[in-house]
Image (spheres, coloured by chain):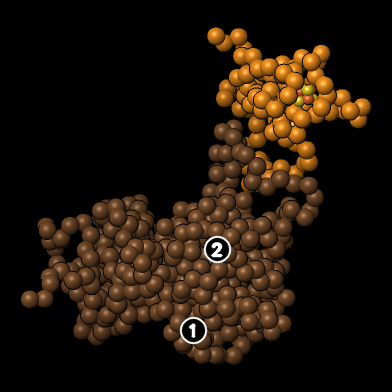
Chain colours: A brown, B orange
């Protein structure tokens, strides 16, 4: 059924998925903590393990431009980046999405300046959430590996770019057992991309000026593709599940069945959160966890279904939206719950935690749970910050 | 844009994906002449057909024939930038206000 199990970091597992997905082009510029991905991939190229062309560029603006040019010519194109590198791609992110080019990127989440920091939070990719890219977040190296294939399949079937996100260092550099697909099975799953018109298929102009008479129709068309991505993603997940035995639905419910309280979060902290849930359950508390894998498009219905009827939910953002009321996940979950009947709607508490690599412990979850069970403190503000020092030691 | 015009344009369902233009040379169909606020006027009798203005035009609106002679302006595409008038060494091009605006 499946291939071998290897001890791999999230970065190495992702690079292997990229080789197995048989790209034509890989363009990248190194940036911590994603540097290892192009490093491993360029070794595959040097060792003749992939026929892909490796394009070493002088910036991330160029790596995304190279991917766009290659994809516009019909080439399956990959890149990897983090934080400031992603920020330097900003203009091209929108161009890849609006030109409907299924470039696939591995984003290794790192705090976006400043002050400069190389450790994990989600401020880089969360800023790109409205750029038109599909976004999938992984809890561990296995998910980072698996979801790369799912991202590719979804992207190519609807003609939109996709990024897989994993937590910098925590997932990208920690080594854990990862079950790999056999090369042949992975290639069979990925198939070959069948692009429509390309720069090589005849005289075409891509990305010409789009005036007020046409622009809105193209945006509506793009939004339709994003809606279709739900179904395409579900199909990709089903097929991948049949191949690997691992089902990576848009959200993962952990011990939520009879839960009165829930943690809602993204990424590697889900592992710590599940441990906290287990320990709280041992003491008889009815608490569970909801992990979000698919963030774009946003699975609002699945989230509303999973959370409605709970007493209170803690929505935990590893990113401050600077909106004054929490991070982007809290805002999106609040939006998802607004459509549920008022009587079923849980109280929603936004938390911001883990910025710039600040560790989150099981005890932190206990504290959040305590906070959830107590009535909202009048002086708490609209968002609670966890793990931040409040008083200087005396 | 007037509503009468709008109904002849493709809907978001039928419009070309991503605005990709799949026919060559289509920019010629985009008449940019109505962007002009000033119009170049060619004084044929002063022109020495030196062709200095021809490559200076950013809109390829000055034809130059196989007979090595300059032709009249393509006013469907000329945007009235005035570069040609500035480069002509013989004063054979002048710019006048477009549309009778004072
Ligand atoms: S005015 Fe400008 S656009 Fe028009 S012919 Fe002269 S150079 Fe070309
Ligand atoms: S630059 Fe002046 S003289 Fe020379 S071809 Fe143009 S209009 Fe004629």
Residue at the spot 75% in from the left edge and 32% down from the top edge: B60
| Cα distance between the residues tagged 2 and 1 | 25 Å
Q: Which residue is mark 1?
A: A9
Answer with the quadrant where ligand 2 appears in the image.
top right
Which corner quadrant holds the C terminus of chain B? Answer: top right
Secondary structure beneath disc 1?
Answer: strand
Residue at the spot 29% in from the left edge and 52% down from the top edge: A323
Q: Nearer the viewer, mark 2 or mark 1?
A: 2
Residue at the spot 54% in from the left edge and 62% down from the top edge: A60
x%, y% of residue A380? 15, 60
Secondary structure beneath disc 2?
Answer: loop
Residue at the spot 52% in from the left edge and 52% down from the top edge: A91
Q: Nearer the viewer, residue A105 or A380?
A: A105
Q: Nearer the viewer, residue B38 or A342?
A: B38
Residue A59 image label? 2
Q: Nearer the viewer, residue B11 or A164?
A: A164
**Is residue B72 in view?**
yes
x%, y% of residue A57? 60, 66
Q: Is residue A254 left or right of residue A343?
A: right
Q: Quadrant of residue A187?
A: bottom right
Q: Quadrant of residue A62?
A: bottom right
Looking at the image, do the residues carrying marks 2 and 1 touch, with CB atoms under 8 Å apart?
no
Q: Chain of mark 2?
A: A
x%, y% of residue A64? 58, 60
Does label 1 lie on the same chain as label 2?
yes
Crowding at dot 1, Cα within 10 Å, few <14 / some 14-19 / many 20+, comes out as many
Q: Of label 2 and label 1, which has the lower sequence position?
A: 1
Which corner quadrant holds the N terminus of chain B? Answer: top right
Look at the picture and state if B15 lies above or below B82: below
Residue pushed farthest left?
Answer: A394
x%, y% of residue A377? 12, 61
């Amino acid at each position: 059924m499946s291939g071998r199990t290897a001890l791999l970091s999230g970065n190495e597992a992702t690079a292997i998925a990229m080789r197995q997905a048989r790209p034509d082009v890989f363009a990248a510029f190194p940036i911590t903590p994603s540097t290892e991905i192009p490093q491993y991939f360029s070794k595959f190229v040097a060792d003749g393990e992939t026929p892909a062309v490796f394009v070493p560029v002088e910036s991330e603006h160029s790596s995304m431009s190279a991917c766009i040019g290659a994809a516009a010519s019909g080439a399956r194109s990959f890149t990897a980046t983090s934080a400031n590198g992603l920020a330097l791609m900003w203009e091209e992110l929108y161009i890849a999405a609006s030109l409907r080019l299924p470039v696939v990127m591995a984003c290794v989440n790192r705090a976006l300046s400043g002050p400069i920091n190389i450790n994990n939070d989600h401020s880089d990719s969360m800023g790109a959430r409205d750029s038109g890219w599909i976004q999938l977040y992984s809890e561990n190296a296995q998910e980072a590996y698996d979801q790369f294939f799912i991202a590719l399949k979804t992207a190519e079937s609807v003609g939109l770019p996709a990024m897989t996100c994993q937590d910098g260092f925590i997932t990208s550099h920690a080594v854990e057992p990862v079950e790999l697909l056999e090369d042949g099975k992975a290639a069979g799953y990925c198939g070959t991309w069948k692009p429509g018109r390309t720069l090589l298929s005849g005289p075409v102009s891509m990305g010409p000026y789009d005036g007020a008479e046409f622009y809105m129709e193209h945006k509506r068309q793009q939004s339709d593709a994003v809606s279709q991505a739900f179904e395409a993603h579900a199909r990709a997940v089903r097929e991948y599940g049949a191949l690997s035995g691992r089902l990576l639905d848009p959200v993962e419910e952990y011990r939520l069945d009879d839960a009165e309280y829930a943690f809602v979060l993204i990424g590697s902290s889900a592992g710590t959160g599940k441990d906290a849930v287990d320990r709280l359950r041992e003491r008889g508390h009815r608490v569970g966890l909801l992990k979000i894998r698919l963030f774009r498009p946003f699975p609002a219905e699945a989230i509303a279904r999973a959370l409605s009827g709970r007493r209170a939910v803690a929505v935990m953002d590893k990113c401050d939206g600077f909106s004054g009321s929490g991070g982007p996940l809290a805002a999106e979950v609040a939006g998802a719950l607004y459509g549920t009947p008022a009587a079923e709607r849980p109280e929603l508490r936004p938390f911001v935690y883990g910025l710039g690599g600040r560790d989150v412990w099981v005890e932190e979850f206990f504290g959040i749970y305590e906070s959830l069970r107590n009535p909202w403190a009048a002086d708490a503000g609209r968002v609670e910050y966890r793990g931040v020092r409040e008083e200087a030691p005396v | 844009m007037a509503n009468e015009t709008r109904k002849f344009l493709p809907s978001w369902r039928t419009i070309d994906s991503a605005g990709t233009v799949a026919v060559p040379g289509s920019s010629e169909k985009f008449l940019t002449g109505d962007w002009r606020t000033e119009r170049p006027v060619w004084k044929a009798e002063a022109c020495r057909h030196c062709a200095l203005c021809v490559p200076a035009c950013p809109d390829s609106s000055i034809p130059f024939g196989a007979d090595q002679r300059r032709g009249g302006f393509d006013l469907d595409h000329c945007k009235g930038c005035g570069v040609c008038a500035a480069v002509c060494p013989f004063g054979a091009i002048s710019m006048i206000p477009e549309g009778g605006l004072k």
